[in-house]
Amino acid sequence: MDNLYLLIKYYQKRVNADEKLLIENWLSESDSNKKKYEQYIEVWNASNKVKFLKNINYESEWEYIINKAKVKRISLKKTYGFWLRIAAVIAFMLGSYWILQDKLFEQKYLMVQNDSKDELKLVTLEDGTKVTLNYQANFYYPKHFKKKNRKVKLEGNAFFSVAKNKEKPFSIETEMTLIEVLGTSFDVQADQKKTIVTVATGKVRVFNKSDKNIFVELIPNEQAIQEGDEIQKNLIYGENYFGSKTGSFRFKDHSLIEVMNILERRFHFNYHFENEDLKLRELTADFNGETLDDIIEIIQLSCQVRINLKSNQLIISENE
């Protein structure tokens, strides 16, 4: 976060709700970010002690400083500390300006979060790309993409169906990973320690963000897991893997424990079997958008079990 204009707006309590959330998320990420923010504000406050910077216009800071510096005549002895402060402010602004050309100053990001355990949240981008957010996913995207690329950011779990555009590659940045595609559909699950990318259609390239020489290419039913610097590539099996995004599940002679493992990714519950034998009971059923309550009712009838929900935990017992 090197956006001088946005950080000063936040400090002066002039940001909108989206900008406020973006900065506060950044501040909460680490003590290093908080310290960096405090240092920036300290420099800014020091500049405000200088008379000609009190009413600085952020949009035209360079012209303002230059024009005022030309007409201000003060002895060097009296203003040694004064010019050190000005140099610090100018250096900070100059560094921020060029860094921000590829960040938020030129291209503001909107932020959307899914805070519902029961419902997925669909975001449709300007190019037609559809992003389905799972519970507690944070997604950052620009209202308008740049001319040469389509960049977004993700924290949490989401399914992407990317619109094809060979002239404008689509990329997703997570805490550890950079994902690049042209047009495909895939699942991303990302936090501060691990990123998992699973491809449904097309081809995806997954890079270690800190070393782009480390990467893998994925095709359908392949998965990349980055935990640390290395990226591991695996095969996945089963048509229900993406059910947590589509809401569709097809079970044919699946054991009850397999069913619970699949459903928990979609509905975010814990489960407990009162009897180990119950795990082996089999279910054959198709679901397409049903609620968890509806699914539980069908499982109870089909497998002859009782399922109670207590404090977000499914208790599975014998149906007596």
Image (spheres, grey):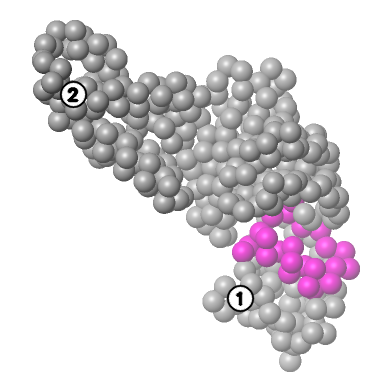
Residue drawn 41% across the image and 51% down it? 31
Q: Position of residue 304 (x, y in %)?
A: 78, 82
Callout 2 environment at 10 Å: few (<14), some (14 to 19), or many (20+)?
Answer: few
Residue drawn 69% across the image and 46% down it? 229
Against 224, is 292 above or below?
Answer: below
Q: Amino acid at mark 2?
A: Tyr
Residue drawn 39% across the image and 31% down it? 3
Image-based side of 227 in relation to 250, left or right: left
Q: Earlier in the sequence, mark 1 or mark 2?
A: 2
Report the mark closest to the observer, 1 or 2: 2
**Cβ atoms under marks 1 and 2 closer than 8 Å:** no
Q: Nearer the viewer, residue 188 or 229?
A: 229
In three-dimensional space, the C-alpha distance between marks 1 and 2, rounded to whole angstroms, equals 67 Å
Q: How many marks?
A: 2
Residue 90: image quadrant is top left
Q: Is residue 264 magenta?
A: yes
Against 55, is 251 above or below?
Answer: below
Q: Amino acid at mark 1?
A: Gln
**Residue beneath label 1, please?**
313
Q: Is residue 196 visible?
A: no
- Write the start and end of the magenta stretch as one range: 242-268
Q: Nearer the viewer, residue 254 or 53?
A: 53
Q: Is residue 298 magenta?
A: no
Image-based side of 224 in relation to 159, left or right: right
- Helix, strand or loop at disc 1? strand
**Residue beneath label 2, please?**
80
